[in-house]
Amino acid sequence: MLTDSGYTPYRYTRPPGIYRLKEGLAIAILSQRDADKIKQALDALAAPVKLLLFTAGDGGQECETCDDARNLFTEVAALSDKVTLEEHQLDGSDGLAGRFNIDKVPALVLTPADGKDTGIRFYGLPVGYEFATLLEDLSDVAKGKTRLSDETRTAIAGLTSPVRIQVFVTPT
Amino acid sequence: MRLAHQMAMENPGKVIGEMVSANEFMDLSRQYNVYGVPKTVVNNGAVEVEGAMPEKLFLKKLLEAV
């Protein structure tokens, strides 16, 4: 797993889980212990951040995990005033999905309070280790800077053609 | 995963960093023959790397794709 040198990832007693209580009713549950730790991390953010969640619209896109995503991020956003959740539809009239080039759901975009794109996308649920990724990303977004080396930042800043990086992951 | 997002943050006008949950997007995973994770795909297959990479190698692979 990718980690920044010298950076200790958040550890949880278990990954934030998705549990199906019964057919047709899905609910994301953060244990109280996880919720406390996550709240601590969110309250410590240097500035307010936004979670833009894109879910299936009326266009009939299949989305088995959109309800789970909505429940999970609703719980996360409720933990701290620093985090605002906005939900948009993939085919919504606001055109936001197009603006962020969202092509599947559920999708999550992280932005600072002004809604400016950070290039950060999560397609599907960030569970297990990727939930720690989400929290670390939020910390970077709030600060408006990363811990990448000067060499990397210079190289990235100098890119003149578009780059799409897709990293496939599974829950760990 | 973090590196892709950090690199996107450094130049969001040009770089998009996407986490893709392989289990939730099976068709896409099949398209890129994802058997092990993390699997990194740059510019729709111009570069594909299976396994975690340190920052320098990640940057090198990314630059190979542009």
Image (spheres, coloured by chain):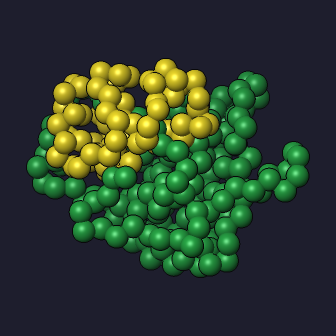
Chain colours: A green, B yellow
Q: Position of residue A22 (x, y in %)?
A: 88, 52
Residue A132, above or below A13 = above
Residue A13 point in image, percent of width and height: 57, 73
Q: Residue A70, position in %: x, y?
A: 69, 51
Residue at the far right: name it: A23
- Quarter of the figure with residue A93: top right
Q: Is residue A154 left or right of residue A161?
A: left
Q: Residue furthest front?
A: B35
Q: Is residue A148 above or below residue A59?
A: below
Asked if residue A14 can be seen in this view, the reply is: yes
- The residue shown at (52%, 54%) is A172
Q: Position of residue A149 (x, y in %)?
A: 16, 55
Left or right of A43 on screen, residue A14: right
Residue shown at 87% from the left, 45% from the top: A24
Count of numbered circles on the image: 0
Q: Residue at x 66, y 49 (%)?
A: A69
State whether residue A130 is above or below residue B62: below
Q: Residue furthest left?
A: A151
**Which of the pair A77/B51 is nearer the observer?**
B51
Residue A74 makes an appearance in the image:
no
Q: Nearer the viewer, residue A67 or B35?
A: B35
